[in-house]
Image: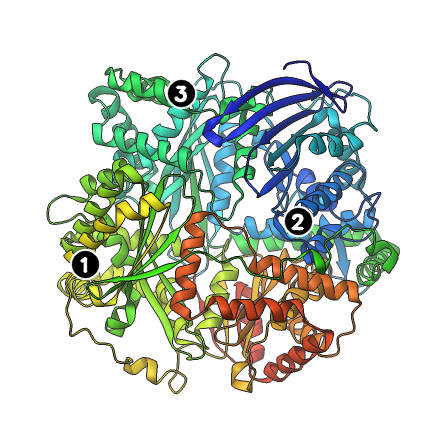
Amino acid sequence: MSGVHAHGFALIQERELPEIRSRVRLYRHERTGARYLSLTNDDENKVFGVSFRTPPSDSTGVAHILEHSVLCGSRKYPIKEPFVELLKGSMKTFLNAFTFPDKTCYPVASTNLRDFYNLMDVYLDAVFFPRLTEAIFKQEGWHYEAESFDGPLSYKGVVYNEMRGAYSSPDSLLHEYTQRSVFPDTTYGLDSGGDPRVIPQLTFEQFMDFHRTYYHPSNAWFYAYGDDPEEERLARAAEYIDEFEAIEPGSDVPLQPKFGEPREITEYYAAGQDSESKAMVTVNWLLPETFPEGEKAGEVNLLFNMLEHLLIGLPASPLRKALIESGLGDDLAGVGLEADLRQMYFSTGLKGVDPDEAEEVQAVIEGVLRDIAENGAPKNAVEAAFNSVEFELREQNTGSFPRGLYIMVRTLSGWLYDKDPVEAIAFEDDLASLRKRLDAGEPVFENVIRTHFLDNTHRTRVTLLPDKSLAEKRLGEEAAELQAVQERLGREGMERVIEEAEELERLQAAPDSPEALATIPRLQLKDLDKENRIIPMEEKSHAGATILEHELDARGIVYLDLAFDLLAMPDEYVPFVTLFGRALLEMGTQRRDFVDLGMQIASRTGGIDAGSFTATIRDTGRPSAQFLLRGKATEDKAGDLADILREVLTEPNFSDRKRFKQIVLEEKARLEHRLVPAGHMVVANRLMARFSPAGLMDERMSGVSQLFFLRELSKKVDTNWDEVHACLEAMHDSLIRRKTALANVTAEAGGLAAFEPLLKEILDAVVEDCDVETTVPEWLRQFGETETGIPDTEGLAIPAQVNYVGKAMDLAALGYKYHGSANVASKYLRNGFLWDRIRVQGGAYGAFTMLDRMRGVLAFCSYRDPNLERTLEVYDESARHLAGLEMSEDARSKAIIGAISDIDAYMLPDAKGYASMARYLTGDTDELRQQMREEILNTTVEDMRRFGEVVVQGLSQAKISVLGDRNAIESFCVEQGVGTTKLL
C-alpha cells in the first residue's frame, strides 16, 4: 500500500506484526517531513506521543527546562499549567514528558477515547505553540532571589532544584560521568538534564532559540498505539502540522570517534563527615550503533541485550559473580548495557571499593571476559540469557507503564536516527536466527566479547571518590559566585532582582480566569463509569491452604504469588525478611548450588522474586503481613516453575556464610544509595511506622531501621555466624507452613486448570504443622502503648543539596471514619494547593499526599525540596485552606475525576491478580470499593471541608520526618530541640 495518502501523509510501510499483535503503518508528511508510526491493535490503553531530536550543545539543561515549560500554557490553552489541569480532571493512564540525552518525548495514554483525544490536543498545542514567557523560564529553569537589598542572593527554579537532587546521588553522578567518559566529543558528553553549576548560564534568548530550532514537524516523530481509529490519529496531528513549512533543523547526532587507547577518569562525590563511604568504579566500552546498518541490525541489538544478561543479569552470572566474590566491593555499579542512544555502551563495576583497588576491579572484569572468549561461555548461562530475553519480549510486561509507551521508546532507539522503527519491535526472525547460530555451535558471544570488549581500545575506567569536604566546598563556591553577582548588580540591580521575584510570585499566585480554565477539554462526571470493574476471583482451598484464582488474558503465562503469614514468625526475625527471601533464591538448595539454581530459574521460568506485603486490615487496626515468592512461566513450563518452587521451599541451604555476607553487603549498599533518589519514600516509611503495626513492620524491613540493622548484621556475620545461620533456619521452620499459606494464581482458563494439580503438589510438599501459632503476637497487642523507637519529630541527615519533608497525622484517633470524599480532598490538595505552593512557588520538584484509608492516616511529603520549615508551614496552611474551601463546580468535578482515575488505574493481568489478592488480605471487598466509588462520585464541597476540619485537628498531634541537607537538618533539629540522626 506504499504511496497511499491521508491528511498530507504518505504511507511508506505497512505490515502485520504478530509479536505485538498490531498492524504497523509508517507514514511521512509530504510537506514537512514529519514521521508518523501508527500501531493499531485491540489494546484499550491507547498511547500517543510526539518526540523531538534535541541534542544540547552545553550542560545548561535547556532541553529539560523546555520540557517543563511548554506544558505551562499554550495558544489554545492560555492558562498557567494545562498539564496540572489535566492531572486534576483526566482519566489518563499516563501523562508526563521525558528528557533524554538526545531527544524529548511527550507521551499520553488513556483507556477513554474522548479523554485520549483531549490529552492529544493539549499536548500538540503545548509543544508547537507554547506560551513561553520569561516568567515561565524563571519558574521552571532558574532565577535569582533575595530577601533584602543586602542579600544574600540565591538560585531558585524547579529544574535547578531537581538537578541539585540528582547531583547529590552518587549513583546518578556515576552514570553521568561514565557516559561523559565514553562520549567526550558528542552531545552525549553533555548533561541534557542540566548541571546545577551550569544551569544559571542559560539565558532566556537561548531557551527560546532552542524551541524555535527543534520543536518543529520537520524534527518530529509522531507515534500512536491502541484501538482508536487510525484516520482520526492522522487528522488530529495534521491539524497542527499543516501550519508549518519544511525546515532543516540540523539535529543529527554524530557518532563518537573511536579512541586510539583506553582512558582513565577520576571524579568525586560529596560524602558525610562521619561517612565510611568508599569509591565506585566502572569499566566502560563504546559499542556499535544501537541498530547498525545492515540486514541483521535487530539481531545485533538482540545479541548485546542477551550478552548483558549472560554477564551480569543474574546473581550467578559469571561477571557479576566474579565481581561480588572478589571482595573488592559491596554491590555492582554501572548501568550495564545502555541501548537508548544512537550508539550503545556497556558499563559495569563495583561500589564500596577501596580507592587504591580500582585496577583490581578492572582486572577481575577483564579476566572474566578473557576466560569466556578463550574457553567459551557457560552453556547454562547462555540458555538462561536467551530464555530471559525471549520471555521479556513475549510477555511485554511493562508494569504500570503502558505497553504502547514502552514500544514507543523502543522504536525511537533506531527510528530517531533514520533507521527502520520496525527493527526494534519485530523480534521473531532475529530470535530464530540467533537460536540457529547457537545450536550450530557458533561462538557467538565469545566473538562479540573478543571484538567489542577485549580488542576494543575505546574503553574508559571511571573512579568516583568520596570527598568529605566537597559539599561545603561547593556551597562555598556557590556563595562566592552569588556574592560576586550581587556586587556586580549593585543596589539598583538588587532592587530589580527583588521586584522581579515579587512579580513572579504574584503571577504564580494569581488564579486563572474561569474563561481560560474553560478552554481545557476534559471529561464530565456523566462520562465516568458508575460501577467498578470487577477482577474475577475464585476462592478455593487445599489441605488447609487458601487458593485464589483469576481467569484473565495473560498471553499464555501463569503468574503465581505464594504468601506466608509473617505473624506466625517470632517478631525478632522481621528485619531478616528481605535477606531471607534472597537467601532462599540465591544461596542454593540441598541438591544444587546457587549458580545452578539461578540458571535453572532463568532458563526455565520468567523469573522468581521474593518480597513482602504489609497493610492494615479494614476495621481492625491489625496488619496483614505476608512473605511472598512471586514466579511466572509460560503455560508449557509451568511444571518447571512448580518444581523449582517446591525445591526452594522444602530444601533450602543457608550454610554458605560468604554468600550470605555478600547479600547483606549488597542490600546495605542499595539502601544507602537510594536515600537520595528515593528520599521521599524513606520519609514516608518513617511516618507510617508511627501509626500502624503494618507500617512499623514495613519500615523495619525496608527503611532506616533496616539500614541500621544491616550495618550491624554485616559485622555479626563475621563474629557470630552460628547465631545468624540459626535465625535463617528458625525463620524457615516457623514461616514456610501450609496452614499459613495463600496461593494466588493468574492465568487463562486452560492455564489455571493445568496448573492446579501442580500447585497442589507444591502445597503438599510444604510442612503442614497444625500447631502453628495463630494468636495475636504480644508486640502487636501492645502497639500504641509502647514506643516505636521513632521520635515524634526527627531529622535524618545526608550529604544532599535538597530535602524531603514529611508530616503525617492519625485521623482515626480523632474519631474520623473513612469516606470516599477523603480521596477527592487529597487529590485536590496534591494537584492544587501543594503543587502551587511547594512546586511552583517553592521550587521543589514536587509534593504529594498519601491517604491510608484502612488505617485512617494522612501524610504529606515533598520531593527534592530546597525548603524545610516553609514546606511544613504549607502543609498546615493546606489543611486550613481545605477546612474553609470555596471552589467552583468545575473544580469539584475535576477533583472527583482525578480521584476516580486513581482507583481505575490501568493494570496488566498480573497486577490485577496481585491487586485482588491484596484486597482479599485486607478485607477490601468489591462491595466496599463500590461504596467508595459512589462516595467519590457524590462528593460535595461540604464533604471536603469536613475532611479539612479533621486534618486541622490532626495538626497538633502530627509527626514529622525530614531527610536531607545536613546543615538544614541540624538547624531544624536544634530549633525543635531534638537530635539529628546521621545516615551517611
The crowd level at tag 3 (other Cα within 10 Å; few <14, some 14-19, many 20+) is some
Q: Which mark is residue 232?
A: none
- Give percent across and percent down for residue 93: 59, 49
Q: Quadrant of residue 104?
A: top right
Q: Is residue 796 visible?
A: no
Say which residue label 2 marks: 159
- Please state if 84 lies on the left or on the right of 848 as rendered: right
Say which residue label 1 marks: 718
Camera-nearest label, 2 or 1:
2
How far separated are the C-alphas under marks 2 and 1? 45 Å
Q: Which mark is residue 430?
A: 3
Which quarter of the rendered picture does the C terminus lie within? bottom left
- Please state if 408 lies on the left or on the right of 251 as rendered: left
The crowd level at tag 2 (other Cα within 10 Å; few <14, some 14-19, many 20+) is many
Return the residue found at the far left. 591
**Amino acid beneath label 2:** Val
Is 199 located above or below residue 890 in the figure?
Answer: above
**Amino acid beneath label 1:** Asp
How far separated are the C-alphas under marks 3 and 2? 41 Å
* Depth check, front residue: 309 or 37: 37
Q: How many numbered discs sit on the rendered protein?
A: 3
Instruction: Name the residue located 59 percent from the left edge and 75 percent from the top edge.
Output: 819
Camera-nearest label, 3 or 2:
3
* Depth check, front residue: 793 or 974: 793
**Amino acid beneath label 3:** Asp
Instruction: For the residues labelled 3 and 2, say whether their Cβ atoms are less than 8 Å apart.
Output: no
Q: Is residue 127 visible?
A: yes
- Give percent across and percent down for residue 227: 60, 37
